[in-house]
Amino acid sequence: MTIEQEIKEIIDSLSIMQNEYAHEIKKKTILRRSAGVLIANLRYNSPKDTGNLSESMRVLPLYKSKSSIFVGPDYKGQKIKGQEEGEDEREGIGSHAHLVEYGHITKSGKRVEGQPFIKQTYEETKHLVLRDLKTEIIELQKRLERKLKKSLRTGKA
């Protein structure tokens, strides 16, 4: 076999691999797994009046992006602890996170100081998130290498 034929065979194998394993590389899943420590710390650090703010912290997909996620309060309607059927489901879950974070002025004109827990939590945990992200990528690489070796042994590549 000539070197050109070997190179062509390798390129063909890489093309098959790329098509076969592309579905395994789910960027949002990798990001979601690595954001677990951030969510746990956001829930722990959030001010707890009713507990709804801390419970609203989660990983949400950004639908217009194939490789991005949102980590923070969920503004969508969910049932709140003790909420009756038919009541407004949006009220009180996470829609007030920005008011807690930055502060606000009440209807009576009184200034309520912010309690910046989101920025603080991000700064405290960003190195942990990056560490977990690297771990997830390394695990994915190992898994794909094992599949490749197995497929090469069985001659399916």
Image (cartoon, rainbow, N blue to C red):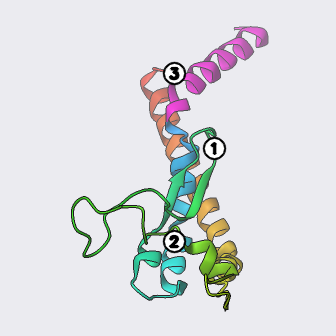
Which residue is identified by label 2? 39
Q: Is residue 156 left or right of residue 139?
A: left
Q: Dot 1: what SS?
A: loop
Q: Report the magenta stretch's main SS.
A: helix
Q: Residues within 10 Å of mark 2 (few under 14, many from 20)?
A: many
Q: Residues within 10 Å of mark 1 (few under 14, many from 20)?
A: some
Mark 1 to mark 2: distance in Å?
A: 18 Å
Which residue is identified by label 3? 157
The answer to whether residue 139 is visible is no
Q: Residue at x 46, y 28 (%)?
A: 151
Q: Position of residue 135 (x, y in %)?
A: 59, 62
Near-viewer residue (100 or 126) = 100
Q: Position of residue 46 (x, y in %)?
A: 53, 83
Q: Would you place residue 70 above or below residue 147 in this image?
A: below
- Please tell me whether residue 15 belongs to the stretch shown in magenta: yes
Tag of residue 41: none
Q: Dot 3: what SS?
A: loop
Q: Residue at x 61, y 39 (%)?
A: 66
Mark 1 or mark 3, which is nearer the start of the sequence?
1
Mark 3 to mark 1: distance in Å?
A: 28 Å
| Quarter of the figure with residue 76 | bottom left
Near-viewer residue (87 or 49) = 87
Q: Residue at x 62, y 87 (%)?
A: 108
Which residue is identified by label 1? 67
Where does the magenta region start and end? 1-23
* Residue furthest to the front: 108
Q: Is residue 5 left or right of residue 54?
A: right
Q: Residues within 10 Å of mark 3 (few under 14, many from 20)?
A: some
- Residue mark closest to the camera, 3 vs 1: 1
